[in-house]
Structure formats: C-alpha cells, structure tokens
Image: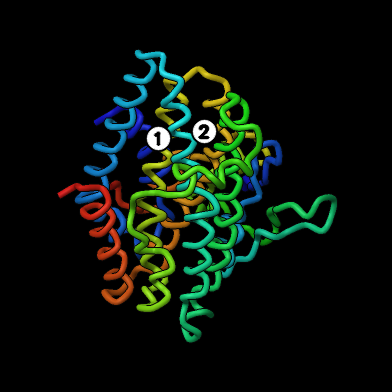
Amino acid sequence: MPTLKVNHERCTECRMCYIVCRELDINAVYVALEPLHRIEIDATACTYPGCTACLMYCPAEGSIIEAESGRSMVPPPLETWRRRGAHVPV
Amino acid sequence: MHALLEEFLDKWVWPTAPGAPGAEFRWRLTKERCLKGWEISLRRTVGEIETELARGDEASKKVRALRGYAAEGVHMSIKQMSAQLLSVDLPDQARYIDLQRMRARQIWDECKHSKLHADVLIGKGWVKHERELMDQVQANTQPLPAYFGLSMMFPHIHPLARAAQNYYQEAIACLGIMAHLSLADDPLVRHEHLSQRDEELMHFMEGKFQIDMYCVTPETQKPVEEALDYLMHQVGGIG
C-alpha cells in the first residue's frame, strides 16, 4: 500500500493536517521530537489510501507526497476524493 | 466564470473529505451564494490592478500597502481575533479548542502580513521606519464595522460564525493574491502577496474544515448563514 509523508521543502507547519487527523481520531500526524519538532506522518497509524482527509485541508501545494512515488498529493488529485463516493458538486 | 476562480475552486474548494458531515451544507452555501461574491470581488480586483498597471501608478501601491497594514495587523486582526478567543463560552471551549488554536495561529499570521505591507512602504521609501505608521491615519483605520471585533464580546457570537468569515472572506483574499501574482511584476508587490499566499489559504482551509466537520445541525449552521449574510450584504454590498 502507498504511504504519505511530509515534504519539508514545502510544508509551512500550519498543522491543519494534525488537527484533521486528530478530529477523526486516527492520530497519525504528530510533531517529531527530532530534528526540528516538525510535523510528520506515522505510516503505521495512517490509513491512507483509506482516509485522505488531511489532503483536503492542506494549504501548501506539494507538502504531502506519496512516499514511494514522490507524487504530490496537494492539491488533492481527483481520485483521492471522487472515487470514494463524495458527490461532485458542480 | 473567471479562470482564476475556476482554478481556485478545482484546487481548493471542491476537494472534500469523503463522508465529511457538513460538506453538503458547505457546497450549498458555495454554489448558491459564495460563487457570486467571489466572482464579483475577483473581477473588481483584477479591474483595479489592470487600471493601476495601465497608469503606471506607484501611488496606488502605497494606498494598498497602507490599507493592508490597517486591515491585517495590529489594529484590526489582533483586536478582533483576541476578542474571538475570549468570546467562546466556557461550556463550548472543549468542543472548539482547535478552533481557538487556529485563531491564535491566525493572529500571528496577520501580524506578519501587516509587517509585509510595512516592508513595501519602507522599501519604496515612503516611510523610514514602521513606527512612523502609528501617526498615519490611513495605516490605522478601515471602514468596515467590527462585527467580529470587540463588540462580539457582549453578545458572544457563536464560535462557528467566524467559520463563514474564514471561508468566504479568506477566499477573496486568496483570489486577490492570485490576481496580483498573475498580473503584477513589481518585485516588492509580488513579495507582499507571495509571502502571504499559503497562510491565507490556510485561513480559508480553517473555515472549510470547520464547516465540513462541525456544521451538521441547524443550530451550528445558523450562525454561519447569518455571518455570511452579513459579509455579503453589509460588507460586500452583494444582494
């Protein structure tokens, strides 16, 4: 299964992903002690691609990527929200 | 629809967490009301920028920087957002603790934005030091009533009312930034906007998140609709 990771070249540490993940009680996003108290994603707790919620509220283009391919997931590609039953609003 | 608005919608507005309980409500607000306001605001901003560029008008950059300084920093955002932190009733604080954290973060962001406007004024030689702005009326006033300001301490406006301002008004800020970045080539003006881009988008995302996750009952949707009414009609003049 593919996993997500934070691209620190682009992340602004706004912590929206942290808030979203905790709101859903998944708690995969955490602040790492080392090296710089930055946001990280615990791939063992993250349920991606089952859950894609953090991608929908991240404001920094390219700051969450698929670890294996390096593909940018922000803004969220269509298949991360349309394929799972979300209505298409327009 | 303006191409910049279409891009904004496709990248940041429509993508929605599957199963988000307030998403239907947000989409309805967006389609029935926000789109009209966003389109009008964007076209107004683009028109202003094009007029200023055609005139080669440096004075308008000064006016914009002074207006931005007043609108984003010390005299509006800190006071407004501090009031918003303090106006959440104790019984609501556990539910809306993340909303309060986001607001605290926004106070810091807006102070930085204010400083960026000061940087333009200093860089252009219009003031020597930010302290001079304390004596300039234009840098300390804005014409809008303080619906979300200190006055909200008294009625204790619902914590989610601010979600409408984050969602609707910050989208207008994001669209304005996109317009400037697509048209302006002055390095200081571009810096003034580019440096705010991700943060303003984060403020928009706060509103999107709050509506998607918290606005799931008539009781939590009503304050958002009322605040949107105010923003569109009283502030934006949009019927």
In the displayed structure image, the side of residue A46 where residue B158 appears, left or right: left
Q: Nearer the viewer, residue A76 or B9?
A: B9
Residue A45 lies, with reference to residue B237, above or below; the image says below
Residue drawn 37% across the image and 74% down it: B158
Residue B218 lies, with reference to residue A52, above or below; the image says below
Residue furthest bottom in the image: B91
The residue that disc 2 covers is B193
The three-letter amino acid code for the residue at tag 1 is: Gly
In the displayed structure image, the side of residue B71 where residue B168 appears, left or right: left
Label 2: which secondary element: helix
Give the letter of the chain under mark 1.
Answer: B
The three-letter amino acid code for the residue at tag 2 is: His
* Residue B171 seen from this side: yes
In the displayed structure image, the side of residue B76 where residue B109 appears, left or right: right
* Residue B212 seen from this side: no
Residue B67 placement: quadrant: top left
Residue B102 drawn at (x, y percent): 55, 61
Residue A23 lies, with reference to residue A29, above or below; the image says below
The residue that disc 1 covers is B176
Q: How many marks?
A: 2
Distance of label 1 from label 2 (alpha carbons) = 9 Å
Q: Label for residue B22?
A: none
Contact? badges 1 and 2 (CB < 8 Å): yes
Quadrant holding the N terminus of chain B: top left
Residue B9 placement: quadrant: top left
